[in-house]
């Protein structure tokens, strides 16, 4: 999905106004490797100006990985990297990372969080799930409740659903007039740029499952006692709008994949491949951010700790 590399670099080096070298988070693979990572996550990134058609993205894609077992060692390695880099990010206390997860029901947002962040120190990582807005939230602008949850310096925040619902479910169900939601793409881009200018790096993942896969997962929820709590008949109503959602997702992704806050469209029918690709993308992005432990106080090795 990423071609025309290097064409959209107008912000390069500008969105990290602290003392570290500027990170190229749009193409982290160039900062932290030779440009050809495995799995090849850059091909799932949507270039600014590109028009992705979700029909053309194979949700079953697992690249050269044949089965789950092929991913174990790699996933463990990436999870370990994330954990170490998160510690540096927290200690450095200068920049933050915002990870947006969006998907259809059963798309695997919760499973991704469990699979990718299970070794991260909970003190440095927050997960926020956005449900239908409360009356108080609805009485404000649509970004009000979201802005409050953005990560402070040193932190990683994961959004399980996000401000994008305001151009997804809201659009599909006409919850506000078209004139209102139409303006939100630019508003979102501007707002994400504001965050970026304040040292928050943003990466966004759309977990791409097929309609058939959703059917199987809903059936599993219906039939498995430990999963039944997750089954809501309202999910069937959303499923009936599948095509409208795909159109809304395409617009959200195409209009809001910027060089400062890229969207990645992740093949997600195979949970293990989804986790592997996302873990690698996050690990490389964190490494490109180049978080550093603050220097110790001077001459601490000479200090005798009193009995
Ligand atoms: P779940 O993530 O399955 O717990 O469901 C949360 C529900 O909240 C989903 O059906 C979302 O579509 C809905 N939701 C989240 N944000 C909004 C929003 N801004 N407006 C309306 N519904 C929303
Ligand atoms: Mg749900």
Image (spheres, rainbow, N blue to C red):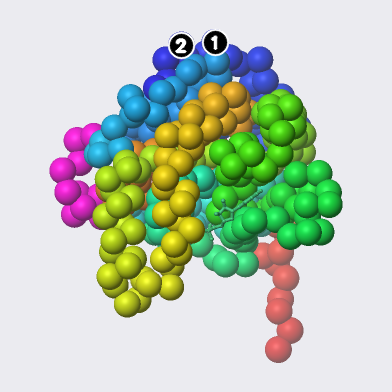
Residue 65 within the magenta-colored segment of the rendering: yes
Label number found at residue 4: 2
The image quadrant that residue 149 belongs to is: bottom right
Image marks 1 and 2: residues in contact by CB distance under 8 Å = yes
The image quadrant that residue 224 belongs to is: bottom left
Q: Is mark 2 within 8 Å of ligand 1?
A: no
Which residue is farthest bottom?
307
Cα separation, mark 1 vs mark 2, equals 6 Å
Give the magenta-colored segment's residue range. Answer: 63-73
Picture residue at 42% right of the left edge, 40% below the top = 242
User: Is residue 176 shown left or right of residue 2?
Assistant: right
Label number found at residue 123: none
User: Is residue 255 shown left or right of residue 105?
Assistant: right
The quadrant of the picture occupied by the C terminus is bottom right
Picture residue at 27% right of the left edge, 45% below the top = 212
Picture residue at 59% right of the left edge, 42% below the top = 173
Closest to the observer: 105 or 188?
Answer: 105
Residue 230 within the magenta-colored segment of the rendering: no
Label number found at residue 7: 1
Picture residue at 29% right of the left edge, 61% below the top = 219
Q: Secondary structure at mark 1?
A: loop
């Amino acid at each position: 999905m990423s071609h025309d590399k290097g064409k959209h670099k107008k912000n390069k080096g500008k969105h990290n106004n602290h003392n570290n070298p500027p990170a190229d988070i749009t193409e982290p693979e160039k900062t932290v490797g030779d440009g050809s990572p495995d799995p090849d996550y850059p091909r799932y990134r949507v270039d600014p100006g590109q028009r992705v058609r979700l029909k053309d993205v194979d949700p079953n894609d697992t690249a050269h990985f044949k089965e789950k077992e092929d991913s174990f060692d790699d996933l463990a390695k990436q999870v370990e990297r994330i954990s170490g880099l998160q510690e540096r990010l927290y200690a450095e206390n200068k920049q933050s990372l915002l990870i947006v997860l969006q998907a259809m029901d059963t798309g695997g947002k919760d499973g991704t969080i469990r699979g990718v962040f299970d070794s991260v120190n909970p003190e440095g990582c927050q997960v926020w799930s956005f449900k239908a807005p409360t009356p108080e939230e609805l009485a404000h602008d649509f970004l009000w409740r979201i802005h409050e949850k953005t990560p402070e310096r040193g932190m990683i925040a994961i959004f399980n659903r996000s401000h994008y619902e305001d151009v997804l479910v809201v659009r599909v169900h006409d919850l506000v007039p078209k004139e209102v939601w139409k303006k939100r793409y630019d508003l979102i881009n501007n707002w994400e740029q504001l965050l970026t200018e304040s040292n928050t790096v943003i990466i966004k993942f759309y977990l791409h499952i097929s309609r058939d896969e959703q059917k199987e997962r809903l059936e599993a929820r219906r039939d498995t006692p430990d999963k039944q709590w997750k089954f809501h008949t309202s999910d069937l109503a959303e499923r009936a709008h599948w095509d409208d959602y795909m159109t809304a997702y395409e617009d959200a992704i195409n209009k809001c994949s910027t060089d400062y806050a890229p969207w990645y469209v992740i093949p997600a029918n195979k949970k293990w491949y989804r986790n592997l690709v996302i873990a690698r993308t996050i690990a490389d992005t964190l490494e490109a951010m180049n978080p550093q432990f603050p220097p110790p106080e001077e001459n601490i090795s000479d200090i005798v700790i009193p009995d």
